[in-house]
Image (tube, grey):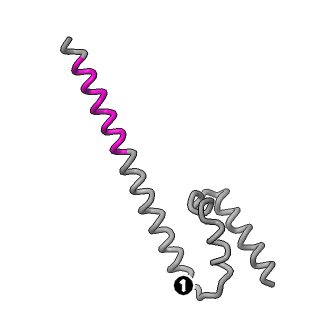
Amino acid sequence: EIGDLAKAIHKAVDYCIEADHLRSFLIRNRAEVEPMLLSEGTVEEYVDSMNEVKEQEIERLKRELSKVTQEKNEEIARLKALLAAKENK
């Protein structure tokens, strides 16, 4: 029975990755996710843990977005300075 459950969990994780549900998180953390799902726990504990996972992923994405935004703003400022210097020549 545990073997069937493990296979079902593995297939579910595959599906989530293919359907782009928490794809990057599952690819990075699959080794921890599948055994965690096999361990005993209530539905409420599972929901709580998944909410925590989602919150962590959201925070990671916010940090990544902030970094990319900052890099883009710096590049825009650099290009504006180059353009201004060229116009002043």
Residue found 44% across the figure and 62% down from its top? 58
Above or below residue 19? Residue 40 is below
Apparent side of residue 10 relative to residue 84 in the rendered image (left or right): right
Above or below residue 59? Residue 77 is above
Residue neighbourhood size for the residue with mark 1, other residues' Cα within 10 Å, grouped as few (<14), some (14–19), many (≥20)? few
| Residue 3 lies in the magenta stretch | no
Image quarter of residue 44: bottom right
The three-letter code of the residue at mark 1 reads Glu
Residue extending farthest top = 89
Apparent side of residue 53 relative to residue 32 in the rendered image (left or right): left
Above or below residue 60? Residue 70 is above
Q: Position of residue 51 (x, y in %)?
A: 49, 74
Image quarter of residue 23: bottom right
* Magenta segment, prevailing SS (helix, strand or loop): helix
Residue found 36% across the figure and 41% down from its top? 71
Q: Position of residue 65 (x, y in %)?
A: 40, 50
Apparent side of residue 12 relative to residue 77 in the rendered image (left or right): right
| Residue 83 lies in the magenta stretch | yes
| Pick the front one: 9 or 60 | 60
In the picture of the structure, the residue carrying the numbered disc 1 is: 45
- As helix, strand or loop, the secondary structure at mark 1 comes to helix
> What stretch of residues is rendered in magenta?
69-85
Which quadrant, please, contains the C terminus?
Answer: top left
Residue found 53% across the figure and 74% down from its top? 50
Q: Position of residue 82 (x, y in %)?
A: 27, 22
Apparent side of residue 68 relative to residue 73 in the rendered image (left or right): right
